[in-house]
Amino acid sequence: MSFDLTDEQRSFRDVLRSFVDQRVAPNAARYDREQIFPQDSFDACVEMELSALGVPEAYGGAGADMVTQAIMAEELARGCASTSVTMLITKLGMLPVMNFGSEELKREYLPRVASGDIQASYCLSEADAGSDVAAMRCRAERDGDDYVLNGSKYWITNSGVSETYTVFAKTDPSAGGRGISCFLVEKGWGVQFPKHEDKMGLRASPTGEVVFDNVRVPATHRIGEEGDGFKIAMHTLDRSRPTIGAQAVGISQGAVDYAGQYMMGRKAFGAPIAELQGLRFMLADMAIRTEAARALVYRACATIDGDDPDETLGYLGAAAKSFASDTAMSVTTDAVQLLGGYGFTKDFPVERFMRDAKITQIYEGTNQVQRVVVAKHLLK
């Protein structure tokens, strides 16, 4: 099977690359330094209708395939990883609605997501329940036509910014993973945001605690049936995880591009350091690993587009995410090394690339957990 881009996808990539260079990348250092939501970059993305990319056409979106969505994630991350995750997180939050929600929920929320009027967050992790989802303590108790939510979620991207929160909570604490249900909760229903994290990377993407203190949620806003939450969560992450790989590829590509430009301009021993074979080989290895990661990410995304079985999809998504994020960490570390002392300063973007790369090895399932998925597939 070939995973070469179509002419339309290549054209989209070229247009988006120019857009990122002009409207997104110039804002990245300031938003990272000030640790504030990248509003100008987000507004520019909405103007480009990128918020509509992953929403089905029936609900006002573009209905783009996953490979095209990966191109978006990659190109945005090449200029600003925080903006990239900002555009990805709403799709993550809305995937349960798209795949398991009622028609009423789809019609109420998806058009507003496509237009950029609202953003969404995905609330799965807790302080003591990250990889071990079944250990969550957040509760949802039925009370007439409502559910009452109590508990906290941690490490939530776009905390306080998003208007909707897709929340996983225990409706039957005695049933373990089978007792989890999924809900769409609006910010204005009493959701609290007491703490934001001071992070190493992705500093322009707010991450924080989300608290539910007797928050009433209409039963109409339950996604799927009671007890379907674990299945919905895993189904969603399998289809979102490859775009984290795409984000990692974009960070890698940004580091390769900048390091190459720097090497041609920086002189040592009377000539550009690009003439030094040892450094040339470093750059070549960075590019090789980046291309390999891109190919694996595109294959995983094409598997989603092909509606392949969940087991194959989970394996490829785990492989793509872990390999691409490990590559991003390695490539950005080498980029800092190639710039020497300059690479260690905030006057150059490679140190930001390196800080941003680290989280791609952690969120949406650590790379250690991804290797468990890969090994389980191989040894079934």
Image (tube, rainbow, N blue to C red):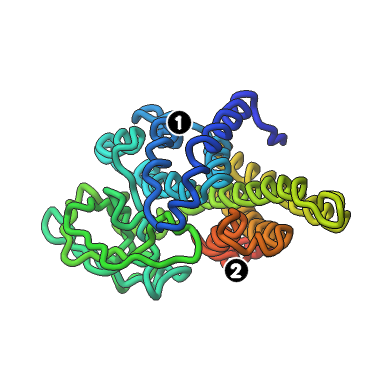
Can residue 230 be seen here? The reply is yes
Is residue 360 visible in the rendered image? The answer is no
Whether residue 118 is situated above or below residue 333 in the rendered picture? above
Residue at disc 2, secondary structure:
helix
* Residue farthest along the right direction in this orientation: 277
| Structural distance between the alpha carbons of marks 2 and 1 | 33 Å
Q: Name the residue located 50 percent from the left edge and 61 percent from the top edge.
A: 201
Front residue of this view, candidates 106 and 197: 197
Contact, mark 2 vs mark 1 (Cβ under 8 Å): no
Residue 268 lies, in percent from the top left, at 82, 56
Q: Position of residue 281 (x, y in %)?
A: 84, 54
Question: Left of 18 or right of it: where is 59?
Answer: left
Q: Quadrant of the C terminus?
A: bottom right
* Disc 2 target residue: 368
Q: Which one is earlier in the sequence, the residue at label 2 or at label 1?
A: 1
Image location (x, y in percent) of residue 122: 37, 55
The residue under the point 21% across, 63% down is 149
> Dot 1: what SS?
loop
Give the number of the disc on residue 79: none
Residue ID at (57%, 67%): 369
Indicate the amino acid at tag 2. Answer: Gln
Q: Going by the image, does 262 lie left or right of 148?
A: right
Disc 2 crowd rating (10 Å Cα; few below 14, some 14-19, many 20+) is some
Q: Is residue 191 left or right of residue 270?
A: left
In depth, the one of 117 and 199 nearer the eye is 199
Residue 350 appears at what percent x and percent y?
Answer: 62, 56
In the picture of the structure, the residue carrying the numbered disc 1 is: 63
Q: Nearer the viewer, residue 137 or 266?
A: 266
> Can you say whether 64 is above or below 126 in the image?
above
